[in-house]
Image (cartoon, rainbow, N blue to C red):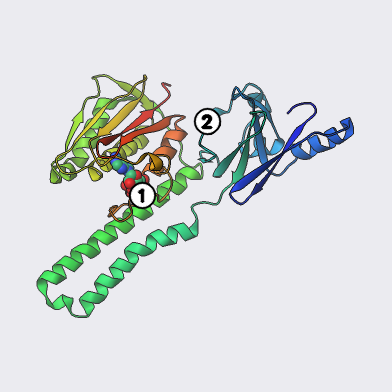
Amino acid sequence: MGINDLYICVPFKRFVRLFKIMPETRETYELLKNYVEHFPIGLLLFNDKKELISWNKQALNLLESKEEDFKKNNLGLISSQINEIVSTEKMLERDLIGLTKPYKLKKVIADDKNTILVVLETHQESIGEMSHELRRPLTNIKTLAESLLLGAKNDPDMCQKFLEQINNEIDRLTRLVNELLSLSKIRSGKLTQEKKKINLKTKVEDAIKLLQSIADKVKTKIFNEVPEGYEIFADPEQIDHVIQNLLENAIKYSPEGSTITVKSGPTKGSFQVDDTGVGIPESELSKIFERFYRVDRTKAKGSSGLGLSIVKNVIDLHGGKIEVKSKVGSGSSFIIYLPID
Ligand code: ADP
């Protein structure tokens, strides 16, 4: 921080207020500096060139970092996540994952164009949010079971139909619980990566085989246009999950008879999944990676809104980036950038 001025950040609910103080005497300066230094909230200060220029003790503690690394502008595993919030103009907050606890970063831009990041500890997935999502399939199962008990069981066709619906709801519930467990594992820092060189074409082929029957049902064709021998550097199991999830979405959000293409991306080690589906409105693009977010809840049958959040978290942990380009009515492209090694 400048020799004569200090920033004080006061987080309040969803907002953070920033105060710039200009102490009149050296003594008050030292006193306030000491206060900011021991402030119970992590603070990181970036200059207008997006370089880390100052921080307090709590930031080092929370981000499990060392003073020497910060001095070299080295933010380690979290560097791409921090870089994303500092350099993306409209992003004012984002989740920070991969540490032993999940944190939220809030961004405040000062008049002098310096940027302050405030590190706030967050609770695991909110219990209210989760219960709400779990209650829906449970209510449906209860209604279907009650209808069977009240007489539907005596009509063989109705009985078959209701039991199939109960079965589907239980599948949905199981998927939701599994996804919540993965998300909580990722966000608590318990998921580690064993990165290896991976032949992407083979990985995509495996994912297509797994999803072929679902794609066939809606007459969707999936093309694997990844060049022979194209390599990415990632955790094989986690990248399987990413590819499958993006393909599942592409199938789910495309009309019958669409085409999906997987190919290498614009930079070395990147790849993309393109579809000719319904597309995503521009205003929704930044929200689709949030937990439980669906663009159109009424049409999103059997979806949890957790898939892309898991994908983004996994890519963040790899130090990579996910980008989406989309046009309503024409289709979407999800591009994954991964560090080369
Ligand atoms: P889910 O598919 O379970 O709802 P996701 O987190 O995978 O959850 O996706 C969030 C939302 O983003 C979806 O509900 C959908 O509205 C939108 N979406 C994701 N992928 C696509 C796609 N390929 N095309 C159009 N919309 C998509």
The dot on residue 294 is: 1
Q: Residue at x 34, y 37 (%)?
A: 242
Residue position for label 2: 77
The quadrant of the picture occupied by the C terminus is top left
Q: Quadrant of residue 17?
A: top right
Residue placed most toward the observer, 175 or 307: 307
Secondary structure at badge 1 equals loop
- The amino acid sitting under disc 1 is Arg
Residue at mark 1: C-beta within 8 A of ligand 1: yes
Q: Earlier in the sequence, mark 1 or mark 2?
A: 2
Q: Residue at x 32, y 51 (%)?
A: 296
Label 1 packing within 10 angstroms: few (<14), some (14-19), many (20+) = some
Ligand 1, by image quadrant, is top left
- Measure the alpha-carbon separation of dots 1 and 2: 29 Å
- Tell me: 246 left or right of 100: left
Q: Which mark is residue 62?
A: none
Q: How far across and down, in percent of the image, does residue 201 sit?
A: 25, 26
- Give the position of the N terminus as an image quadrant: top right
Q: Is residue 142 above or below residue 182?
A: below
Q: Quadrant of residue 257?
A: top left
Question: At numbered mark 2, what does the secondary structure look like: helix, strand or loop?
Answer: helix
State the image coordinates of residue 294 (x, y, percent, origin top left).
36, 49
**How far across and down, in percent of the image, does residue 75 sit?**
58, 28
In this picture, residue 26 sits left or right of residue 93: right
